[in-house]
């Protein structure tokens, strides 16, 4: 198995899914501008390792990764979870997802 420093996101998922009790995260909107990320220490460690693995991914690997309670990765969430997360590493040949979203929204208003 790879060391923690060179795990891919798939490695992290595989590593934590082998545990007797895989970690569970709760993610939900608390209010209009705050998202709750809740879990015990192993769940938060899983999330941290997942983000670190994504940040270390080489150029030949995907620039984005996501987990969601209603889609791929739903095993990592509690039933109370209402939102997931989408990681996008820049620079990317497609540019910023947020900038593209804002541009599309602005274009639709016209």
Image (cartoon, rainbow, N blue to C red):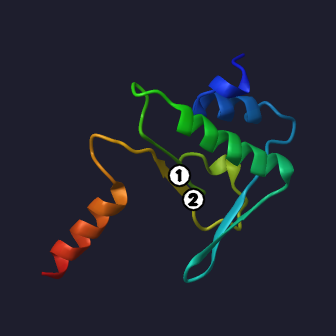
Tell me the quadrant of the picture where the N terminus can be found: top right
The total of numbered circles placed on residues is 2
Q: Residue furthest front?
A: 91
Instruction: Using the image, determine if residue 38 lies above or below residue 51.
Output: below
Q: Which mark is residue 71?
A: 1
- Quadrant (top left, top right, bottom left, bottom right) of the C terminus: bottom left
Q: Nearer the viewer, residue 107 or 78?
A: 107
Q: For the point 69% across and 46% down, which residue is it?
A: 48
| Callout 2–callout 1 Cβ contact below 8 Å | yes
Height in image: 87 above or below 52? below
Q: Which residue is mark 2?
A: 84
- Left or right: 104 in relation to 16: left
Which is more foreground, mark 2 or mark 1?
2
Q: Is residue 65 positioned above or below 36 on the image?
A: above
Specify whether 84 is left or right of 12. Answer: left
Q: Is residue 108 above or below residue 42?
A: below
Local crowd size for mark 1, using a 10 Å CA cut-off: few (<14), some (14–19), many (≥20) = few
Q: Is residue 99 left or right of residue 53?
A: left
- Disc 2 and disc 1: Cα gap in Å? 9 Å
Q: Quadrant of residue 46?
A: top right
> Picture quarter containing residue 83?
bottom right
For marks 2 and 1, the one nearer the N-term is 1
Q: Residue furthest left?
A: 110
Residue 49, label in figure: none
Residue, x 69% and y 47% (percent of image)?
47
Dot 2 surroundings within 10 Å: few (below 14), some, or many (20 or more)?
many
């Amino acid at each position: 198995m790879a060391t923690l420093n060179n795990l891919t996101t798939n490695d992290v998922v595989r590593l934590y899914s082998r545990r007797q009790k895989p970690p569970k995260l709760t993610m939900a909107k608390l209010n209009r501008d705050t998202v709750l990320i809740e879990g015990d220490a192993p769940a938060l460690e899983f999330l941290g390792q997942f983000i670190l693995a994504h940040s270390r991914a080489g150029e030949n690997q995907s620039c984005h990764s996501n987990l969601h309670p209603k889609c791929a990765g739903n095993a990592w969430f509690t039933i109370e979870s209402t939102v997931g997360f989408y990681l996008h590493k820049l620079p990317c040949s497609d540019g910023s997802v947020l900038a593209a979203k804002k541009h599309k929204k602005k274009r639709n208003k016209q």
